[in-house]
Image (cartoon, rainbow, N blue to C red):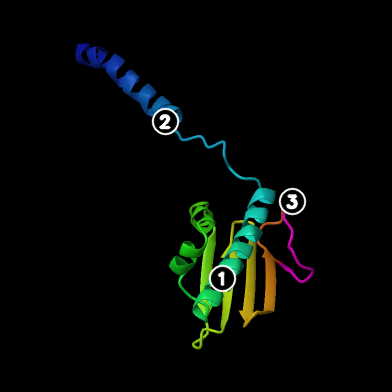
Amino acid sequence: MSPSLRRYLPFMIGAFVLLILLPTLFKKHSTTNASAATQSGETLSALNLVDRSEESYQAAHGHYTAHLTDLLLESRGLAEDITDGLGIQLDVSTDGQSYYALVQSPVLSLLRARHGRTIVAEKCVIVKSESGVSCPTAAHTSG
């Protein structure tokens, strides 16, 4: 082995060890992952929160809103649901008297539609079938 290689060999071995060890040491370990049952419950809770917020908004303004921002003003809890990774989609009819809300998580997808104060549609799809994941109503589809 040449003298220059011998001189740099400890540095090369050290660099190789660091390349192997550093990613393991700095890898983010998350222990706060919610269980599937918790995610399922949070999804249903978020749908109910959106529904109550839409009802409150409709009572105050005479029509439903398609803007999640308007609902955030009605219910501060929605901001936490959004940052927890739930997807919330809203759509409102042109006259503002009907709406649907779709709330999705990694385990469950829930839809609720209203016309006036009457629920005209509710749908649940189990995205990931695990222990504790269930639809809140009898009508559901496994996906």
Q: Secondary structure at mark 3?
A: loop
Q: Is residue 9 left or right of residue 88?
A: left
Quadrant for the N terminus, please. Answer: top left
- Give residue 56's position: percent from left, percent from top: 56, 70
Residue pointed to by mark 3: 132
Highlighted magenta segment, given as a residue range = 131-141
Question: Residue sitting at 20 percent across and 15 percent down?
Answer: 4
Residue 6 position (above or below residue 118): above
Residue pointed to by mark 2: 26
Question: Residue sitting at 44 percent across and 27 percent down?
Answer: 25
Q: Identity of the amino acid at label 3? A: Gly
Residue pointed to by mark 1: 56
Give the CA distance from mark 3 to mark 1: 31 Å
- Give residue 59's position: percent from left, percent from top: 56, 76
Give yes or no for residue 137 being in the magenta stretch: yes
- Give residue 124's position: percent from left, percent from top: 69, 68
Q: Identity of the amino acid at label 1? A: Ser
Q: Main secondary structure of the magenta part?
A: loop
Give the CA distance from mark 3 to mark 2: 33 Å
The answer to whether residue 143 is seen in the rendering is: no
Quadrant for the C terminus, please. Answer: bottom right
